[in-house]
Image (cartoon, grey):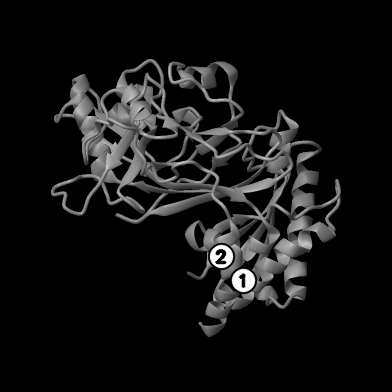
Amino acid sequence: MRKVLLWLTCLFPLILSAQNIVLNPGFETLKPNSIIKSCDYIRNGKVFTNSVQDWSAFNNYTPDLIIWYDSLRNCSYPKPHSGHNMAGIIAYHPNTDSGYENDYHELIQGKLKGPLKPGVTYRISYWVQQNDSTAIKHLKAVFGHSTSIIPVSCNNLGVWFTEGPIQPTEDFNKTIRDFGITPHIVETTVVRNKPNAWTQVTATFTADKPYRHFILGNFSSDARTQTFPLVSDSIMTLRNSNKPFYQKLKRIAYYCVDDFSIEEYRPENAGQQIAAALSAKKTYTLTKVLFNTAEAVVLPESFAELDALAAYLQEQPEVRVEIGGHTDHIGETQANATLSENRAKAVCQYLAEKGVAPERLTAKGYGESKPVAGNDTEAGRKRNRRVECKVVTGY
């Protein structure tokens, strides 16, 4: 423990130097004359935009701003991650359940203090909590108290960057469907949390344009979204047989969102970022681990991040990890699988040479089987070519 504390103490000045460039990251600052009540959900799509400083929503949808105080009684919303305010969004609600023409997803748009710098890598993080009572209350307010609700967690929470703001009057979900917009960052695993606990979602992103705004939400169809528990359409059809519409089961993933952060990713901060990611998410994408095309030799540009990972693993001897290699879809499937495994083995060998016991390291090649972005653009293929570290025991 003393070594861990010493290591964190050495990192503390570096942690302080990181600057969050998201304006109003915890939704604490409201616009003058805001009319939102404590512990209440929003019934009008314009209210979020007109109430929260530096954030906006789209008029056809109703994401929430939740105001929470310790003095509240019988509030179905959980306590915010910090402060008194947080946002709430529906990330999964199939049209087969709602009767709407399309799946219902709420998205919120944030603003940055200044533009992202092309070529610079940023660390994005935000805290979420899926809460059953909140989800149930939300849908019963829409469909009535006789409706049965199935709260779920889901994947595909994504962040899409844009140079200029998308106007609240636009039906942005329709834009996503019409133009196939793919978020720059997407959480491919189902985001779950223990009851009343917050989970941090983290990722890194290398800017290719001077983006000033970002949108958070589920950009995928619910047919392509995974949930926990898994309640398939066929099960829903069977269980809803002969029931009137307002008594039919309805699925929803509702997430409270708080403390959004975007900051420059710096190699000297890699240790703190690795520790946070492996502790909260049990996975970390090694964004600075690089290889030449079709080769599995770790390049020198990778050493700083791998050294930070090795140092962390030495400070946490109970942790065992899987190093997973991933490729884009260019080339033969089997060749990509072999290449990704060899790259994972190369990373494991590097970590072993830095003092990590080999029995704590497992190399696995996934090839092109687990993309995190579309392969139709170079930016997407670049994101798919990656090495991930996943905790398999410990914590």
Task: From the viewer's perspective, tell me whether residue 197 is left or right of residue 261.
Answer: left
What is the count of numbered marks? 2
Q: Quadrant of residue 284?
A: bottom right
Query: Looking at the picture, does residue 68 appear above or below residue 301?
Result: above
Q: Residues within 10 Å of mark 2 (few under 14, many from 20)?
A: some
Residue 73 placed where, x, y %? 13, 49
Q: Which residue is mark 2?
A: 275
Residue 50 placed where, x, y %? 35, 26
Which residue is at a point 32% across and 45% down the rendered structure image? 85
> For the residues marked 2 and 1, what is the alpha-carbon distance in whole angstroms?
7 Å
Name the foreground residue: 121 vs 25.
25
Q: Residues within 10 Å of mark 1 (few under 14, many from 20)?
A: many
Query: Looking at the picture, does residue 177 appear above or below residue 287?
Result: above
Give the amino acid type for the residue marked by disc 1 in the picture: Tyr
Residue that sits furthest to the front in the current view: 32
Name the foreground residue: 51 vs 185.
51
Task: From the viewer's perspective, tell me whether residue 17 is left or right of residue 56.
Answer: right
Labels 2 and 1 touching (C-beta < 8 A): yes
Which label belongs to residue 5? none
Residue 29 placed where, x, y %? 37, 41
Residue 265 placed where, x, y %? 65, 53
Query: Looking at the picture, does residue 260 appear above or below residue 138?
Result: below
In terms of secondary structure, where does tag 1 sit? helix
Which residue is at a point 48% across and 27% down the rendered structure image? 221
Which label belongs to residue 312? 1
Q: Is residue 320 visible?
A: no
Give the amino acid type for the residue marked by disc 2 in the picture: Ala
Residue that sits furthest to the bottom in the current view: 2
